[in-house]
Image (tube, rainbow, N blue to C red):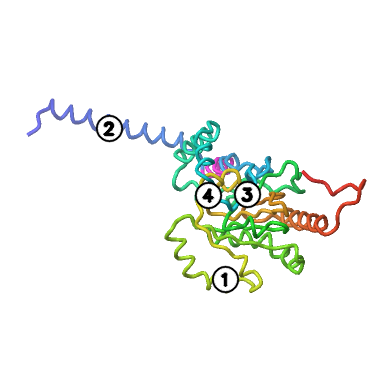
């Protein structure tokens, strides 16, 4: 049985609870904006998080050394090991790789479809251009030719390469100096085995004339990915390689209309120079 004192304490407790509930409701209603305001805030936040514009390619891609199919001798490997600058470069590369997350490539495809730079509008100057490394014997295949080399690793990368080369191949495929080379790059040994098993099926999807130039490679690209600008293993990359094995133009991910047109122009310029020497005193088309 409750005494009068207990009843008074219970009454004061109920009153305090009622006041606290009322104050909390007023505080909540004053802090919660109306539904229209919520929509406006969301829209402003979405505009502030728009991805930055795609910057143009700012450097020549490739490696500084002339590619070769010869295996390095013991003395050459020893010289590389004792080269301090090369060892520092390898160390910087390893630190960068260690700091990159496992899902980095997948995350980057959500921004501009993985496109990190825009292809140049004109050819890279010959004296500034670097060399395309030897991948799956491309050194012998591309020497003396004007080659468009597509680096493939996924289904989406195949679509990316096709967006640059469908109109280009239709225009130049009959020119004996021009060739389109596709390299299916699978550094994972299990994926490479599967690709080789289904190679005939893969080649059945491309024109017969291109079968000999559809290559499969599991070459370790660890130290040439960065020089080639291949920072995302899920998208496609396209390189224009001249007869001297130099990278004169490059693109990545899905083609923009101006990039597709630029590649057609640049291939045409190289083909004209290859078949008809430039007369003395005549200016060449512009290069980057």
Q: Do the residues under discs 1 and 2 have CB atoms within 8 angstroms?
A: no
Residue 147: x %, y % from top left: 69, 58
Please give the label number shown on residue 279: none
Q: Residue at x 59, y 62 (%)?
A: 158
Q: Which of marks 4 and 3 is in front?
A: 3
Which of the two labelled residues, at mark 4 and mark 3, occupies the earlier sequence position?
A: 3
Q: How far apart are marks 1 and 2 (CA)?
A: 77 Å
Which element carries disc 2, helix, strand or loop?
helix
- Residue 219, placed above or below residue 206: above
Please give the label number shown on residue 67: 3
- Asked if residue 85 lies left or right of residue 23, the reply is right
- Residue 16, placed above or below residue 124: above
Which of the two labelled residues, at mark 3 and mark 2, occupies the earlier sequence position?
A: 2
Q: Give the range drawn in magenta.
A: 35-44
Which of the two labelled residues, at mark 2 and mark 4, occupies the earlier sequence position?
A: 2
Which element carries disc 1, helix, strand or loop?
helix
Q: Distance between the residues labelled 1 and 4?
A: 23 Å
Number of residues whose C-alpha sits closer than 10 Å to that of mark 2, classed few (under 14), some (14–19) or many (20 or more): few
Question: Which quadrant of the rendered structure holds the C terminus?
Answer: top right
Frontmost residue, 212 versus 103: 212
Q: Nearer the viewer, mark 3 or mark 2?
A: 3
Reading the image, the residue beneath label 2 is 17
Question: Which quadrant of the rendered structure holds the N terminus?
Answer: top left
Reading the image, the residue beneath label 1 is 203
């Amino acid at each position: 049985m409750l005494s009068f004192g207990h009843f008074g304490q219970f009454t004061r407790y109920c009153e305090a609870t009622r006041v606290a509930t009322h104050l909390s409701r007023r505080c909540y209603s004053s802090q919660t904006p109306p539904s229209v305001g919520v929509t406006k805030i969301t829209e402003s936040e979405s505009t502030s998080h728009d991805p930055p514009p795609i910057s143009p390619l700012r450097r020549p891609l490739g490696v500084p050394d002339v590619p070769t199919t010869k295996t390095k001798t013991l003395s050459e490997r020893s010289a590389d090991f004792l080269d301090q600058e090369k060892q520092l470069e390898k160390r910087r590369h390893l630190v960068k790789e260690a700091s990159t997350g496992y899902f980095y490539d997948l995350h980057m495809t959500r921004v501009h479809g993985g496109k990190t730079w825009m292809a140049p509008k004109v050819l890279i100057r010959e004296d500034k251009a670097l060399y395309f490394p030897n991948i799956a014997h491309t050194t012998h295949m591309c020497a003396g030719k004007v080659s468009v080399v597509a680096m493939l690793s996924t289904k989406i990368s195949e679509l990316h390469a096709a967006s640059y080369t469908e109109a280009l191949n239709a225009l130049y495929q009959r020119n004996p100096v021009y060739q389109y080379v596709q390299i299916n790059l699978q550094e994972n040994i299990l994926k490479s085995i599967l690709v080789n098993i289904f190679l005939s099926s893969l080649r059945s999807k491309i024109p017969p004339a291109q079968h000999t130039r559809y290559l499969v490679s599991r070459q370790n690209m660890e130290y040439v990915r960065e020089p080639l600008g291949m920072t995302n293993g899920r998208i496609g990359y396209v390189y224009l390689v001249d007869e001297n094995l130099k990278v004169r133009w490059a693109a990545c991910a899905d083609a923009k209309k101006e990039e597709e047109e630029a590649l057609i122009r640049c291939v045409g310029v190289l083909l004209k120079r290859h078949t008809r020497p430039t007369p003395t005193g005549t200016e060449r088309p512009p290069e980057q």
